[in-house]
């Protein structure tokens, strides 16, 4: 089974959605047969580093609300994250563009460590207050999952994977993605948002059963099993 997930590194619901999906997956009997692929989605492609501006101010401007309201919204997300075992520290978060972070994820995919890289990027931004738009942070994240620092540096100084990021976002537009996280199971079923663990569990079970209809099914009349027992 393949699960494609569109998300942004600076999307608070995305990290929470990742953890909820992983919780459902951990109890799924066939979890070892599920392949996860992260797809690029930039909430604000024009975002850039603004020294001195807090995430509360940035959110307030995007939503057209007061800074106090922006902080209140972030406090709500912090509480929601805590419920699934995550630590959000918005007061330490650094605003920056996420294009290079997405390029790193495509680079990591080629080397088989995309999921691990995604987790490290989320933690760097939300928990540790690192600048995920800075080459230093991206190299450090890459090294922590076994990637080569020199190769990451060379990639970041090139335009590698720009097309892949754009293609992911184009596909998201074509399939009607309005917000992230957005999960697509076997290119057939979609789940939008950080849904409850039970929702992900139900979809995993449904997709698996549809792909393997005879598994768990009762033997039909006259059917003989491999050990010679017939009904």
Image: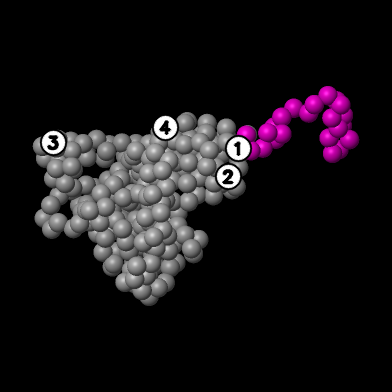
The residue tagged 4 is 196
Bounds of the magenta segment: 210-231
Q: Residues within 10 Å of mark 1 (few under 14, many from 20)?
A: some
**What's the mark number on residue 208?**
1
Question: How far apart, in angstroms, are the residues tagged by discs 2 and 3?
Answer: 42 Å
* Residue 113 appears left or right of 90: right
The residue tagged 3 is 65
Where is residue 123 shown, x and y percent of the image?
Answer: 33, 53
In the image, 178 versus 102, the foreground residue is 178
**What's the mark number on residue 1?**
2
Q: In the rendered structure, are the residues bearing label 2 and label 1 in contact, judged by CB atoms less than 8 Å apart?
A: yes
**Residue at 80% from the left image edge and 26% from the top image edge:** 220
Q: Earlier in the sequence, mark 4 or mark 1?
A: 4
**Residue at 29% from the left image edge and 67% from the top image edge:** 135
Question: How far apart, in angstroms, are the residues tagged by discs 4 and 1?
Answer: 19 Å
Question: How far apart, in angstroms, are the residues tagged by discs 1 and 3?
Answer: 44 Å
Quarter of the view holding residue 157: bottom left
């Amino acid at each position: 089974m393949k699960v494609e997930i569109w998300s942004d590194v600076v999307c608070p619901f995305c990290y929470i959605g990742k953890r909820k999906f992983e919780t459902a997956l951990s109890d799924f009997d066939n979890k070892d047969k599920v392949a996860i692929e992260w797809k690029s989605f930039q909430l604000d492609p024009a975002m850039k580093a603004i020294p001195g501006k807090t995430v509360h101010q940035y959110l307030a401007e995007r939503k057209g609300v007061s800074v106090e309201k922006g902080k209140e919204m972030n406090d709500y997300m912090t509480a929601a994250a805590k419920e699934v075992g995550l630590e959000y520290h918005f007061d330490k978060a650094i605003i920056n563009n996420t294009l290079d972070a997405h390029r790193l994820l495509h680079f990591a995919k080629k080397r088989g460590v995309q999921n691990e890289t995604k987790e490290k990027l989320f933690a760097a931004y939300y928990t540790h207050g690192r600048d995920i738009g800075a080459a230093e942070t991206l190299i450090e994240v890459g090294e922590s999952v076994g990637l080569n620092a020199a190769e990451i540096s060379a990639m970041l100084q090139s335009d590698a994977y720009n097309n892949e990021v754009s293609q992911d976002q184009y596909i998201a537009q074509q399939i009607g993605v309005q917000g992230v996280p957005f999960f697509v199971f076997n290119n057939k079923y979609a789940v939008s948002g950080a849904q409850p663990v039970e929702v992900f569990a139900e979809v995993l079970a449904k997709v698996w059963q549809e792909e393997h209809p005879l598994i768990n099914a009762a033997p039909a009349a006259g059917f003989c099993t491999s050990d010679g027992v017939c009904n």
